[in-house]
Amino acid sequence: MADSSTRTKRHSTEFWLRAALLSGIVVFLALFLQELDYEILRELRLDPWPLLIGACFSLGFRYWGVYIWRGILRDLGATDIPAFSVLASIYARSWMARYIPGTVPWIAGRVLLARDLGISKSRLTVASVLEAGTQIVAIAAVSLLLLGLDGRLTSQFNGRIGLAVLSAGLVFAILLIPAIFNRVIRFSYKVLRGQEAYAELATNSKATLRSLLLYAIGSLLAGVAYYFMALAVWGSVSAADLIFIVGAVNLSGVIGMAAPCVPSGLGVRDASQLVLLSVILPREVALVLTIFSRLWSLIVDLVFVAIATLAGAHRKA
């Protein structure tokens, strides 16, 4: 009875938190739309070639995640790891769980889909939590450092903003230290589950450091994809904008992942991306890019699932 009451209260809290977030975003967007110059929107044209190049980079980032997950399993001592294409099929299908509110479905889906591969469930859980955690920490660190070093964010607001962003980047960079990262993971488990973490949750330094470094590289891969998407929509985007766009879209993605009650950071990621891109682009262009990037990301996800599932099925056959 107590458990049922607790679940009801939690669901009620999540509902009102989601409602508050979405209401705030709607108000922000309404105010934003009032100040747009719609003549600029009529002049926009879509260039397909940069868009295709960006899609290749974006698809590559998703396969990069499969490579990192496979490496973590190996570093944690998993044996008889199946072929890369089989793991990619599992990763791709669980990747779509990002469209369900919260981070747990994304991780749990991967564990459930992979449990018949002969790898222990606890090791799969640790590897999936570590992969998700290092992805968030590494991408946040890189994006915050890039934005902090870019002078335009500071000049748009004030020096304190740039200093705060750079400081936050340094904090996340400290979290990349394996010993500290592992302590954070164990503490988070205790807070969420109300019990001490089991022994296998203690990852080794090799798995942690390797995945953090690889996701730091992967953040550049993901950011470049959005740079080409921006170039496809707004041809005036310059090479000098690359660093800022990489930092902006990655940071907004991390903020979206951190939003606990909305699927795929819906609204939260978009609002933060809109604010950041408006620093270097016309507000009208930033809005189009934000809306278009949501659709574009979904299409790339579906292509990823289709390719990985077909390749995985062919390998099993």
Image (cartoon, rainbow, N blue to C red):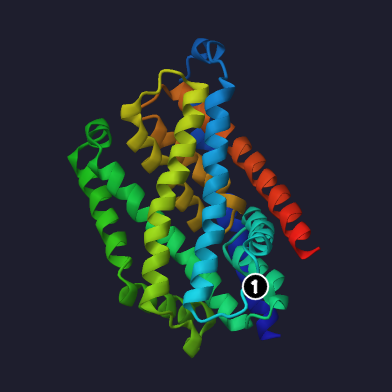
Expressed as whole percent of the image width and height from the top left, the position of residue 222 reads: 47, 45
Residue found at the far left of this picture: 159
Residue found at the far right of this picture: 317
Expressed as whole percent of the image width and height from the top left, the position of residue 119 reads: 63, 80
Q: Is residue 39 above or below residue 23?
A: above
**Apparent side of residue 17 relative to residue 239 in the rendered image (left or right):** right
Q: Is residue 300 visible?
A: yes
Expressed as whole percent of the image width and height from the top left, the position of residue 147 reads: 30, 42
The kind of residue tagged 1 is: Val
What residue is at 43 percent from the left and 24 percent from the top? 283
Kindly identify which residue carries mark 1. Answer: 111
Q: Is residue 184 visible?
A: no
Between 182 and 61, the residue placed more toward the observer is 61
Q: Is residue 203 above or below residue 165?
A: below
What residue is at 44 percent from the left and 41 percent from the top? 223
Expressed as whole percent of the image width and height from the top left, the position of residue 29 reads: 52, 33
Query: Circle 1: is it few (<14), some (14-19), or many (20+) Cα within 10 Å?
Result: many
What residue is at 47 percent from the left and 76 percent from the top? 75
Quadrant housing the C terminus: bottom right
Quadrant housing the N terminus: bottom right
SS state under label 1: helix
Between 312 and 13, the residue placed more toward the observer is 312
Q: Is residue 214 above or below residue 51?
A: below
What residue is at 66 percent from the left and 85 percent from the top? 2
